[in-house]
Image (spheres, rainbow, N blue to C red):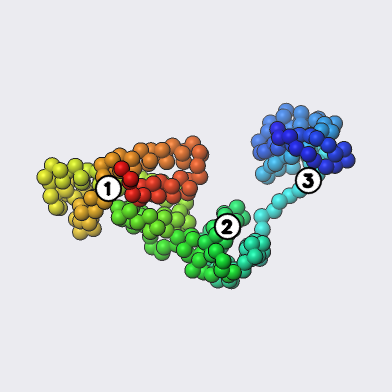
């Protein structure tokens, strides 16, 4: 519970209690909650948050009748452009019609995600008063036809801007599938670079290295020379970062997109050692 001041019939110092996902409560819990609402505490402001309510349950209807009920509907698709334009206007800027269309096409209609991208666009455009399509493409990192192989290549050359653009393009295309592919591809690329460096020290040369790794020479010859872009210490640190990122995503410590972006920046950053 959080202490706060709130107004009402009996304004004063009280507590705000937020109870989420009440649709998951058992019937006995709903009955208890309904009983409390018959004689609620004057010093407590109780907010109940639910998804879809089962109106067939007696106590759900009782709780609704004893509360101030507000339904937050999703905006219709044709309302999203107007919402976006108004949101940008709050920052004293305008956004072109084409930029609005591009932003919705890439991000979707989720207001949380759209708001997050708007904040990035506001910062990105600086003193400019109008957000254009090119701004959306640069901020979202939209790269048509990008694949995890493009991501691997950008990381190999420590191209942090390119890697982030490709990563975001992949996540915008299919967030769940590509977050798994991206993390696996990054780990695989670090492993290949480490093995290449080891084999070079052992005297193995050219396509013989790639054959041992099961890589097609035509597409991967650049890896042999590019392996010099990383030291052994940097590759070891990269492996450690991949493991930490995997744990952060699985435990929910960080949103997967942020965790992957930070991983890419960490690996591509030049070591000071």
What crowding class fits label 1: few (fewer than 14 Cα within 10 Å), some (14-19), or many (20 or more)? many
User: Element at badge 2?
Assistant: helix
Mark 2 highlights which residue? 119
Q: CA distance from mark 3 to mark 2?
A: 31 Å
Q: Position of residue 214 (x, y in %)?
A: 21, 48
Residue 200 against residue 16 in the figure, above or below: below
In which quadrant will I find the C terminus? top left
Position in image of residue 11 (x %, y %): 85, 39
- Residue 68's x, y, as percent? 80, 44
- The disc placed on residue 230 is 1
Query: For the residues carrying marks 3 and 2, which lies nearer the camera in this image?
Result: 2
Residue at figure coordinates x 48%, y 60% from the top left: 140
Quarter where residue 225 is shown: bottom left
Q: Earlier in the sequence, mark 3 or mark 2?
A: 3
Is residue 110 shown to the viewer in this render?
no
Q: Secondary structure at mark 1?
A: loop
Q: Badge 2: few (under 14), some or many (20 or more) residues near its Cα, within 10 Å?
A: few
In the picture of the structure, the residue carrying the numbered disc 3 is: 69
Spatial distance from mark 3 to mark 1, Cα to Cα? Answer: 59 Å
For residue 53, which quarter of the picture?
top right
In the image, residue 90 sits, relative to residue 98, either above or below, namely: above
């Amino acid at each position: 519970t959080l202490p706060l001041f709130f107004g009402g019939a009996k304004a004063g110092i009280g507590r705000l209690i937020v109870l989420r996902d009440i649709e998951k409560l058992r019937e006995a819990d709903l009955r208890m909650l309904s009983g409390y609402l018959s004689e609620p505490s004057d010093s407590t402001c109780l907010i109940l948050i639910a998804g879809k309510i089962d109106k067939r349950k007696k106590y759900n209807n009782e709780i609704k009748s004893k509360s101030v009920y507000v339904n937050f509907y999703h905006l219709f698709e044709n309302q999203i452009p107007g919402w976006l334009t108004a949101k940008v206007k709050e920052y004293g800027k305008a956004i072109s019609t084409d930029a609005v269309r591009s932003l919705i096409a890439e991000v979707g209609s989720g207001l949380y995600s759209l708001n997050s991208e708007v904040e990035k666009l506001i910062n990105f455009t600086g003193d400019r008063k109008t957000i254009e399509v090119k701004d959306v493409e640069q901020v979202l990192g939209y790269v048509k036809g990008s694949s995890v192989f493009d991501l691997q290549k950008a990381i190999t050359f420590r191209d942090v801007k390119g890697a982030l653009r490709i990563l975001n393009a992949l996540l915008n295309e299919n967030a769940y599938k590509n977050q798994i592919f991206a993390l696996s591809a990054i780990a695989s690329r670090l492993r290949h670079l480490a093995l290449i460096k080891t084999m070079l020290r052992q005297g193995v040369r050219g396509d013989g290295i790639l054959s041992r790794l099961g890589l097609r020479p035509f597409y991967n010859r650049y890896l042999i020379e590019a392996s010099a872009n990383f030291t052994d210490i940097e590759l070891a640190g990269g492996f450690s970062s991949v493991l930490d990122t995997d744990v952060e995503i699985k435990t929910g410590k960080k949103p997967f997109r942020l965790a992957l972006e930070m991983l890419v920046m960490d690996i591509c950053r030049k070591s000071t050692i």
